[in-house]
């Protein structure tokens, strides 16, 4: 006579019973497999989210870096740091100068200019004293030295020079598309007295303000007034500094 077993009321309970009968020495939670599977799913989902977050974050970093990099070199304003004494006492060693690359040089302006001499190429900050077509010279006075620079027959006042002395140099006419440059520290500057007039195309920018080591800002003495960068203007950071080059004595 066959005895009919009642159907199991709870499949989970039956699974637990069979598992216990098969491995009576192993005592484990009946839902252990489900817990392990759920935990594995959560870990995979977390890893996927982590990868997505890292990808988005990395993308933001890259985009921010690229955006910042694309601004460099595109501003009208940039800065240089004066390492030499050729423009003292207008600009001291270590002071930063903000320049505008779009301005056209005028008499009295301080400019950064690209120069080549004896096979050496360098940049320097110098002052524009004469423009194309001007006559300029520093004649010998009664005391045997130059009393003042003369441009187009008129003495040029230079109160920013302080006690520096300008050695005499002959009068000449500045050629077309060129300018005549002098350093404010006439005893040390390598300028147009030695290298001749400089091409306008070699001018990289016109100074609009000077900033000392304490962050105090001042106008360029003896130069025409130029607006500096506003709060919303980008200013490229200081790059390579012009070297200290001394003219022959």
Image (cartoon, grey):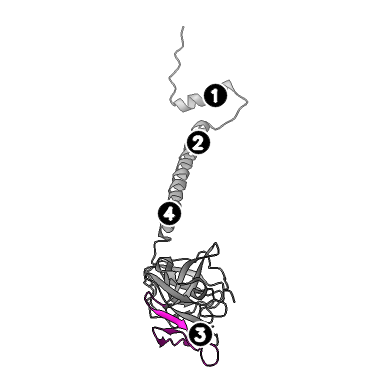
Residue 40: mark in rendering = 2
- Mark 3 residue element: helix
Residue 66: mark in rendering = 4
Residue 103 locus on image (x, y percent): 37, 71
User: Of the residues under marks 3 and 2, which one precedes in the sequence?
Assistant: 2
Q: CA distance from mark 3 to mark 4?
A: 44 Å
Mark 2 surroundings within 10 Å by alpha-carbon count, few (fewer than 14), some (14 through 19), many (20 or more): few
For marks 4 and 1, give the one nearer the viewer.
4
> At 40% from the left edge and 87% from the top edge, which residue is drawn?
154
- Mark 1 residue element: helix
Q: CA distance from mark 2 to mark 1?
A: 23 Å
Observer-nearest of 228 and 136: 136
Residue stretch in magenta: 130-159
Residue 161: mark in rendering = 3
Q: CA distance from mark 3 to mark 2?
A: 79 Å
Residue 19: mark in rendering = 1
- Mark 4 residue element: helix
Q: Are marks 4 and 1 in contact (CB under 8 Å)?
A: no
The relative height of residue 73 versus residue 139 in the rendered view (above or below) is above
For marks 1 and 3, give the one nearer the viewer.
3
């Amino acid at each position: 006579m066959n005895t009919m077993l009642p159907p199991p009321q709870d499949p989970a309970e039956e699974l637990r019973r069979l598992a216990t009968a098969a491995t009576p020495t192993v005592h484990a939670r009946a839902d252990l497999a489900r817990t392990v599977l759920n935990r594995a799913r959560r870990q995979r989902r977390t890893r996927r989210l982590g990868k997505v977050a890292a990808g988005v974050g990395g993308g933001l970093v890259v985009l921010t870096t690229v955006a910042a990099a694309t601004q460099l070199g595109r501003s009208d304003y940039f800065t240089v740091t004066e390492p030499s004494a050729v423009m003292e006492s207008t600009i001291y060693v270590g002071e930063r100068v903000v320049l505008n690359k779009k301005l056209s040089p005028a008499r009295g302006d301080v400019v950064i200019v690209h120069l080549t001499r004896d096979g050496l190429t360098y940049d320097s900050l110098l002052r524009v004293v004469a423009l194309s077509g001007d006559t300029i010279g520093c004649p010998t006075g009664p005391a045997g030295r130059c009393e003042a620079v003369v441009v187009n027959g008129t003495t040029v006042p230079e109160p920013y020079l302080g006690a520096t002395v300008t050695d005499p140099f002959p009068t000449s006419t500045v050629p077309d598309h060129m300018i005549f440059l002098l350093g404010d520290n006439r005893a040390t500057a390598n300028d147009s007295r030695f290298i001749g007039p400089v091409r306008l195309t070699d001018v990289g920018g016109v100074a609009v303000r000077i900033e000392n080591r304490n962050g105090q800002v001042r106008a360029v003495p003896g130069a025409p007034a130029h607006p500096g960068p506003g709060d919303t203007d980008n200013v490229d950071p200081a790059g390579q500094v012009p070297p200290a080059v001394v003219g022959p004595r």
